[in-house]
Amino acid sequence: MTITQTNNTQSPISNHQSLFLSACKRDPVDTTPVWFMRQAGRYMPEYRAIREKYSLIEICHHPEIAAEVTLQPVRALGVDAAILFADILLPAIPLGVGLEFAKGEGPILQNPVRTLADVKNLRPVNPETDLSYVMDAIKILRGELKDNVPLIGFCGAPFTVASYMIEGGSSREFLKTKTMMYSDPQTWHALMEKLTVVLTDYLVAQIRAGAQAVQVFDSWVGALSPQDYQNFVLPYSQKIIQAAKAEQVPVIHFGTNTTTLLPLMKEAGSDVIGLDWRIPLDDGWKILGGDVAVQGNLDPALLFAPLPEIKKYTHDILRRANGKPGHIFNLGHGILQNTPVDTVKAVVDMVHEYRQ
Amino acid sequence: MTITQTNNTQSPISNHQSLFLSACKRDPVDTTPVWFMRQAGRYMPEYRAIREKYSLIEICHHPEIAAEVTLQPVRALGVDAAILFADILLPAIPLGVGLEFAKGEGPILQNPVRTLADVKNLRPVNPETDLSYVMDAIKILRGELKDNVPLIGFCGAPFTVASYMIEGGSSREFLKTKTMMYSDPQTWHALMEKLTVVLTDYLVAQIRAGAQAVQVFDSWVGALSPQDYQNFVLPYSQKIIQAAKAEQVPVIHFGTNTTTLLPLMKEAGSDVIGLDWRIPLDDGWKILGGDVAVQGNLDPALLFAPLPEIKKYTHDILRRANGKPGHIFNLGHGILQNTPVDTVKAVVDMVHEYRQ
């Protein structure tokens, strides 16, 4: 770090300020902030205890329980941000596609969207009322969280949400999704427009309820070529990101397998861009340019390695960030199910203790 | 194309020469050669008729049937190369891991390799005898194929084969594979060394039986960061490729999601490198440098699109290749199951009819 603290009151970040929000704005910080995608979840015993009584959807529907689950990793790990416990497919429920979470199977949508008529049949959604339980959880959390641990709201990006709605669940090849793009672009664009409106309203509602930053998850967009991203996805992601930015909170734009999409994701205009482990952090940051913050990029599989090995990789990422303002430490994708909690905690400490 | 034919006898490629082999060597050709990964398979009615009587493994075990299945797409499509019908996991059978192909499930390995003892328990393999049926199919095919349609042999690269052997089947996260790398590098390297010997012997045996080019499939290697590729994979892929090259046939090195791995794959030393649709062909070729040929890079999902749309993408790839010697047209991955045969044939014609 090139920033030197002369005394505590003049330090760039006081105890009441947020390392995470400062890094989103590329303000200098003396310690790299760290949080983890899917930091609340099955790998935590506290979460599993709650899941014995409630399904994933039931947790989301009960704001007190969603808030409790959101707080579990903040207490256990000492991370620098909380991320609301929710699912990117919650807006699909009021849209009327018949969302279910089959045991150990991931999401299943009983009424997938395949035609223009299907798009037209999607119900209108008012996130303030239809997803009020999400806003309620945010309000509870803002009362519980300290100022130095901001709350991140989030939504799926239109491509990733559309892919679930078209495929009817998870996918490896995204064949139905791509076939709609290539063979029926009218239906594709109609669906993307509809989702963009719903997801924008949803994200703005989260910010107005108290979310201090938001992340747009385009987890599967790396299945596309740059030209398809540009024609079929970028304009929609751009609209959501711009609308969230207009609410004066930092926006993080996340995807995996996105090396060749990074220059276009930059055009979408977020404050922070996620980098997965496939690209060394400094190489990715170089492609993006210095006027954007980056988040990443440890391989989640590394959390199953011995600590000295993890330390090597963690330090390598921090070394590549080189103390440049605007790095938020995270994984390249979400925490995997059987990850040891102690290891996750140890990584938080490694990041916090690191000095260039 | 900058090559002009002054008369037929002086044309760069006579009817008896192979466009495909010339392109592998970066010799000028007047027509871009084209073949498809998984060009023999379920999307063809002729193949499905044979599969009604024989399992995948039974086809491989019967050289006449394997040869017949290999020839089906050559007859139906007019492609410029035949690829031996086989499976990258065939060498796993004599290694003793209990390979099965469950219906619609992909490969299952009853005895996955997880420890150093498991690696030591792998049986010694002599491809000339243990996989003699593959060499017999190659010999039959060389008698059937004309000189202008060379036969491609192939093997899985050590990483991709190891991933199946460690995971016990297909995988999305490659968590067990990566965990072995990070937590038990001794076992990882022992397994990779063993596989490198077996796969090298297997590939060399195919060449000596008559394969006129070979492809090394590292289909899943894009799950790795460049530093892990360099430390855990590159030395082994390099050995196989060098051994095949020493037999004086062109070697194609294939992977998906490999944008950040391309400079390292170049170091592995093949004559041709596969590019998937995530990177525009000219951008990928630029990263690799002019001294290597490239193969690709249409998204297999595009074969489900209407022909005018496919033509747009196909011409875009050919335009990006810009007539530079050393481009073999192919998909970025294998043909998908329900691909319309007429569309595949139409793409062959589009490529053959294209002129810069």
Image: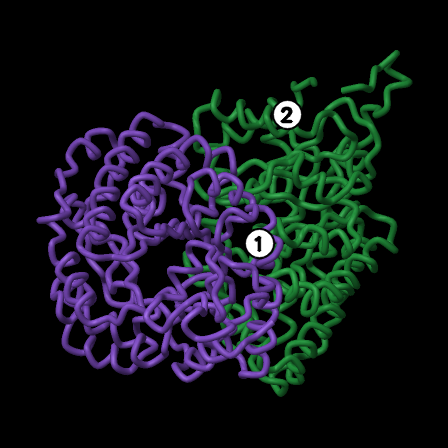
Chain colours: A green, B purple
Give the residue displayed 23% in from the left and 62% down from the top: B102
Provide residue B108's location: percent of width, then percent of height.
Answer: 25, 54
Q: Quadrant of the N terminus of chain B?
A: bottom right
Q: Is residue A101 in view from this perspective?
A: no
Camera-side residue of A257 and A245: A257
Where does label 2 land, which residue? Answer: A351
User: Label 1 amino acid?
Assistant: Ile
Q: Is residue A14 in view from this perspective?
A: yes
Q: Are marks 2 and 1 in contact (CB under 8 Å)?
A: no
Where does label 1 land, which residue? Answer: A59
A194 on left or right of B76: right
A213 on left or right of A9: left
Count of numbered circles on the image: 2
Q: Residues within 10 Å of mark 2 (few under 14, many from 20)?
A: many
Camera-side residue of B346 and B334: B346
Provide residue B59's location: percent of width, then percent of height.
Answer: 17, 67
- In this rendering, the answer to whether A191 lies above or below A344 is below
Cα separation between marks 2 and 1: 31 Å
The earlier-in-sequence mark between 2 and 1 is 1
Q: Nearer the viewer, mark 2 or mark 1?
A: 2
- Residue B176's image quarter? top left
